[in-house]
Image (spheres, helix red, strand yellow):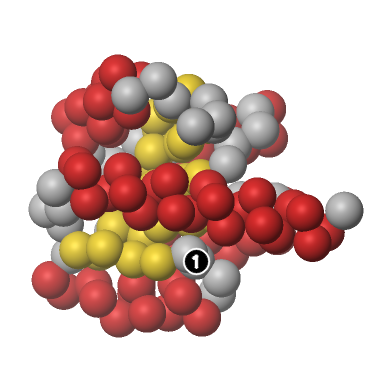
Amino acid sequence: MDRFRVLVIDDEIDFVETMVKRLKDRGLEADGATSGPEGLDLLDNKDVDVVVLDVKMPKMSGIEVLREIKKKKPLTEVIMLTGHGSVEAGIQGLQLGAYNYVMKPVPFSELLTLIVQAYERKLIEQERDS
Ligand SMILES: [Mg+2]
């Protein structure tokens, strides 16, 4: 598998730190951000393949962040993390071009599978684009 880059954006610091560590343990490049603006800054400076994005964050919601990501980097794939009260945001995310959404708490192995699938779709889209 390629060593691709994942960015985790979630306002729960512990979740971000754990995810980044686990992704790195699997041999991936991983970065974390605890707010939408911080995540978007990172996206400007690094070639991110897949973003894992919380929908419920203060300041800037996941949906707003998704819109910006798709404006800046349309080929970057985004997986939305929803909660019980925010499944609708996940569905809205799909309409705005997210790869998929998943409800928290999600087992790491399940999320990793989705991340790899999202990356594979990005490769196909890149091929089509070139
Ligand atoms: Mg949150």
Q: Which residue corresponds to the image point at 46% horizontal and 36% vertical from the top-left?
A: 7
The answer to whether one can see residue 122 in this image is: yes
Q: Amino acid at mark 1?
A: Ala
Instruction: List the single residue furthest toward the front.
Output: 1
Q: Which residue corresponds to the image point at 25% horizontal and 76% vertical from the top-left?
A: 87
The image quarter in which residue 42 lies: top right
Say which of 106 and 62 sits in front. 106
Q: Dot 1 corresponds to which residue?
A: 98
Give the answer, above or below, for where 4 lies relative to 110.
Answer: above
The answer to whether one can see residue 37 in this image is: no
The image quarter in which residue 77 lies: bottom right
Q: Name the spot of residue 103 as percent of width and height, x first.
A: 19, 63
Q: Which residue corresponds to the image point at 26% horizontal and 25% vertical from the top-left?
A: 22
Say which of 101 and 1 sits in front. 1
Left or right for 99, reference 73: left
Local secondary structure at mark 1: loop
Instruction: List the single residue furthest toward the right.
Output: 130
Q: Name the spot of residue 4 as percent of width and height, x first.
A: 54, 31
Q: Name the spot of residue 112 as percent of width and height, x first.
A: 31, 43
Q: Which residue corresponds to the image point at 43% horizontal and 46% vertical from the top-left?
A: 116
